[in-house]
């Protein structure tokens, strides 16, 4: 096992990939070794030829993972690379980017437990991109002028401890493998351009990982190319924005490094009910316990108890004669008779279907509601 695995997703840009891998194969100052995993979801023979040619003389292990995909899916492509890697620390670099020779050593030196290091690439124009050659790449990278604004912004965001910044760019970040696996990697329901990295950042934060900018200490240069067809002029118009902004998001996504089943869900009953025999009969079918790792918390009324801040999904079960208090951010309600909103309100007899309903809600655009 090596210390660092560099994950390089690529699609139909073998000329860019050659310069990317050249910059990665000649990194300096890395201790305990590293490997490079190229994950390609295209059918270009040129991609395989580039990897094979560079691997002959590469001072590090260089492997290619291929997938004949018809859709542009960077989330799935990155996950495939991770699954073929062995390092305890993961560094992501898109195949259309080049990095300075101390890039990996900087990530290695600045990493800490429970921390993900992120940066924003510097976008090069067409003329500069075409001027970069494989033979003189290191010298040419030293001559590039990088804007100061991203560095100043990174310092400012770190100083004020902004709750949603810095952003995570899928082509320029690093994370411990155990933290990445804990949330099941990238959510592969994101297809096409955008938002899969925003979702990963939200779930990493939810799991307790701190996001910190590495922008002041190293750079990544994005090589010019025409935008993908699924990229929109404005972020808000992107094909994945609605899914990103859905109301229920499982921290450990359903379709990621592994395909989860409903049996994987961790469910806990958090209330002490006034009618324990009824509550027990309902919850026995769900195998509900008191796990601190619960993804779903069930509050039954009448009774006592409050939701914690740990769970992803809040469920209220209204037993006969129960008066429902005002509860903010509820995802599902079970009662007899059920409430008017058939997307979220179900009869008590459907409680055993809760895991299936949670899976449905996580894949759709349900918003949590406040009930009274």
Image (cartoon, grey):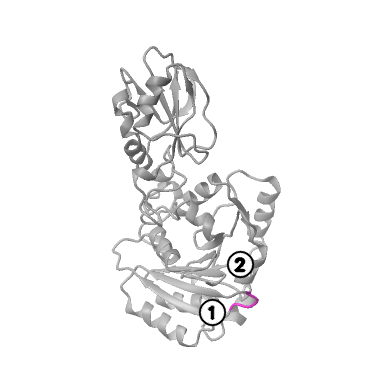
Residue depicted at 52% across the width and 82% down the height: 133
Q: Main secondary structure of the magenta part?
A: loop
> How far is the residue under mark 1 from the one under mark 2?
16 Å
Marking on residue 25: 1
For this view, does 109 lie left or right of residue 297? Answer: right
Residue 24 pos. (x, y %):
54, 76
> Where is 314 relative to 303, above or below?
below
| 14 or 108: nearer the viewer | 108
Residue 365 pos. (x, y %):
37, 38
Residue 58 pos. (x, y %):
51, 84
Residue 260 pos. (x, y %):
36, 49
State the quadrant of the C terminus: top left
Residue depicted at 35% across the width and 26% down the height: 282
Give the residues drawn in magenta, as a range. Answer: 27-31
Secondary structure, mark 2, is: loop
Marking on residue 360: none
């Amino acid at each position: 096992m090596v210390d660092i695995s560099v994950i390089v997703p690529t699609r139909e840009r073998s000329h860019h990939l050659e310069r990317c891998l050249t910059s990665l194969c000649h990194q300096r100052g890395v201790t305990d070794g590293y490997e490079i995993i190229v994950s390609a979801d295209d059918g270009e023979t040129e991609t395989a030829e580039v990897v094979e040619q560079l691997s002959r003389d590469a001072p590090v292990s260089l492997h290619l993972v291929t997938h004949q995909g018809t859709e542009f899916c960077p989330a799935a492509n990155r996950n495939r690379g991770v699954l073929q890697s062995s390092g305890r620390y993961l560094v992501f670099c898109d195949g259309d980017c080049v990095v300075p020779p101390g890039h990996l050593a900087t990530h290695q030196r600045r990493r800490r437990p429970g921390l993900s290091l992120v940066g924003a690439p510097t976008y090069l124009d067409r003329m500069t991109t075409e001027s970069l050659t494989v033979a003189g790449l290191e010298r040419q990278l030293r001559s590039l002028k990088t804007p100061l604004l991203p560095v100043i912004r990174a310092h400012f965001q770190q100083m004020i401890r902004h709750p949603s910044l810095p952003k995570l760019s899928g082509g320029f970040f690093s994370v411990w493998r155990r933290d990445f696996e804990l949330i099941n990697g990238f959510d592969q329901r994101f297809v096409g351009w955008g938002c899969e990295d925003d979702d990963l950042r939200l779930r990493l934060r939810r799991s307790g990982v701190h996001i910190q900018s590495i922008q002041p200490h190293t750079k990544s240069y994005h090589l010019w190319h025409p935008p993908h067809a699924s990229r929109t002029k404005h972020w808000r118009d992107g094909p994945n924005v609605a899914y990103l902004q859905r109301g229920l998001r499982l921290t450990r996504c359903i379709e990621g490094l592994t395909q989860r089943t409903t049996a994987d869900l961790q469910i806990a009953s958090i209330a002490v009910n006034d009618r324990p025999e009824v509550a027990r009969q309902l919850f026995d079918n769900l195998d509900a316990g008191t796990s601190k790792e619960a993804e779903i918390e069930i509050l039954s009324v009448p009774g006592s108890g409050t939701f914690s801040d740990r769970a992803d999904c809040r469920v209220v079960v209204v037993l006969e004669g129960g008066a429902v208090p005002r509860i903010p951010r509820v995802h599902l309600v079970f009662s007899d008779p059920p409430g008017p909103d058939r997307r979220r309100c179900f009869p008590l007899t459907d409680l055993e279907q809760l895991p299936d309903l949670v899976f449905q809600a996580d894949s759709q655009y349900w918003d949590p509601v406040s009930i009274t």
